[in-house]
């Protein structure tokens, strides 16, 4: 382990020399906040292994683990050029009626070689799923939407920065036709912004070869005086939890002359101005990176303060019945996607006792499984579907009765 650290350090030193010698060749990345160096990225890939130590399979394994929490829902947020799913965790405590919730969006690994951005995100998820009072309070008052790997094709292909089309999807948010990953994220953000719980904080997680922790601050020339007050409040708030860990707000100032239009933060600014605190966070892309738990804790505490969240959980009340008088049945599938070890269940809540049939159909409408036929009881009926063992794909589970049909889409993972 010590040898590995030493080797990485040597790589970084030689990588730094490479970068210094090749500054004139880096014009394509002249506005790069992360400080990309292709040589260094390739060297790190060789040392750390597939996906810089965390690839798509690692993510699938973690999705299985995270989905065991009753506070996690897993959905597809879209797909990639090569057809991989952009997996998203939604973390909230739905046993508490709290609406509108304060929505926090986090996406990481736009740039595949910035694996530290994932490790911070991983610790954010760990904190949010913990038993602490702080976590309970956050889950009750907020909803977190987290995409741990926004560029899985790039991760699998060993690209430092680009998607499968060779395009850097950190920019190009203003360029038609959009890359499919950009289109997916734009659609997702748009749907959240028109929901009853719009996004309040959007964190775009990166890591920088400058080997420091900082936020990319947007100057008032590209935003507004009011927004820069909010930025200073937010960044200062995070930093107050670990002053020596983070650089001050003016460490990296961008948008000094006008508003660029190509970035995700630009898209938020142009459409929603001060409503959304949309910022890039840069962790340390170097061998001395670490303290991811401390970083994650400071970030979440800063978010909570900025959103004026009470850090004391509310008393737990029983959930309201989810069925309304004009519905005969409500169906939920969780966790969804479904996989053998995910222990997925169907929860069918009925207004009355009724006879029915519960089947699974594929996208072509072919019946592929029968879960139960016969009498279903009033209230919650919970049925395990962990042993269905379906091939990967999209399915519909349908409850068929004389009163009507209720269906739910579900995704099967292999
Ligand atoms: Zn980056």
Image (spheres, grey):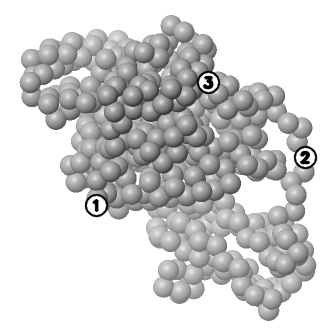
Question: Which label's residue is closer to the chain start, 2 or 3?
Answer: 3
Disc marking residue 317: 2
Q: Is residue 158 visible?
A: no
> Which residue position is annotated with label 1?
177
Q: Residues within 10 Å of mark 1 (few under 14, many from 20)?
A: few
Question: Which label's residue is closer to the chain start, 1 or 2?
Answer: 1
Disc marking residue 302: 3
Q: Residue at x 22, y 54 (%)?
A: 165
* Image quadrant where residue 379 sits: bottom right
Label 1, label 3: how many angstroms apart (C-alpha)?
A: 36 Å
Question: Which label's residue is closer to the chain start, 1 or 3?
Answer: 1
Q: Secondary structure at mark 3?
A: helix
Label 2, label 3: how many angstroms apart (C-alpha)?
A: 28 Å
Q: Residue at x 16, y 20 (%)?
A: 19
Q: Nearer the viewer, residue 313 or 51?
A: 313
* Image quadrant where residue 160 sits: top left
Q: Position of residue 266 (x, y in %)?
A: 40, 41
């Amino acid at each position: 382990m010590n040898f590995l650290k030493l080797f990485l350090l040597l790589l970084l030193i030689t990588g730094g020399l490479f970068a210094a010698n090749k500054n004139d060749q880096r014009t394509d990345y002249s506005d790069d906040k992360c400080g990309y160096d292709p040589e260094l990225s390739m060297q790190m890939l060789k040392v750390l292994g597939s996906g810089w130590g965390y690839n798509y399979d690692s993510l699938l394994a973690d999705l299985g683990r995270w989905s065991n929490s009753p506070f996690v829902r897993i959905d597809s947020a879209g797909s990639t050029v090569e057809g991989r799913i952009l997996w998203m965790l939604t973390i909230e405590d739905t046993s508490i009626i709290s609406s509108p919730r304060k929505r926090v969006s986090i996406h990481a690994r736009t740039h595949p070689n910035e694996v530290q951005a994932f490790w911070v995100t991983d610790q954010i998820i760990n904190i949010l799923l913990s038993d602490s009072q702080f976590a309970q309070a956050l889950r009750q008052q907020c909803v977190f939407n987290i995409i741990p790997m926004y560029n899985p094709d790039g991760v699998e292909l060993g690209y430092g920065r680009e998607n499968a089309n060779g395009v850097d999807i950190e920019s190009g948010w203003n360029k038609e036709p959009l890359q499919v990953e950009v289109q997916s994220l734009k659609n997702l953000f748009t749907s959240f912004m028109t929901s009853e719980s719009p996004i309040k904080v959007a964190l775009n997680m990166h890591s920088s070869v400058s080997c420091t922790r900082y936020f990319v601050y947007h100057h008032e020339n590209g935003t507004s005086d009011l927004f820069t007050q909010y930025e200073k409040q937010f960044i200062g708030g995070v930093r107050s939890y670990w002053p020596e860990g983070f650089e001050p707000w003016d460490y990296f100032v961008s948008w000094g002359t006008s508003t660029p239009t190509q970035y995700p933060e630009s898209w938020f600014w142009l459409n929603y101005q001060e409503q959304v605190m949309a910022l890039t966070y840069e962790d340390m892309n170097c061998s001395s990176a670490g303290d991811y738990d401390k970083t994650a804790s400071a970030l979440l505490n800063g978010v909570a303060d900025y959103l004026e969240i009470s850090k004391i959980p509310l008393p737990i009340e029983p959930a309201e019945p989810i069925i309304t008088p004009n519905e005969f049945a409500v169906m939920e599938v969780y966790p969804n996607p479904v996989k053998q070890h995910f222990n997925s269940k169907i929860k069918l809540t009925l207004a009355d006792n009724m006879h029915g049939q519960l089947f699974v159909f594929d996208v072509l409408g072919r019946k592929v499984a029968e879960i139960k036929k016969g009498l279903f009881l009033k209230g919650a009926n919970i049925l395990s579907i962990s042993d269905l063992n379906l091939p990967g794909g999209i399915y519909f589970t349908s409850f068929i009765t004389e009163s009507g049909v209720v269906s739910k889409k579900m995704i099967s993972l292999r």
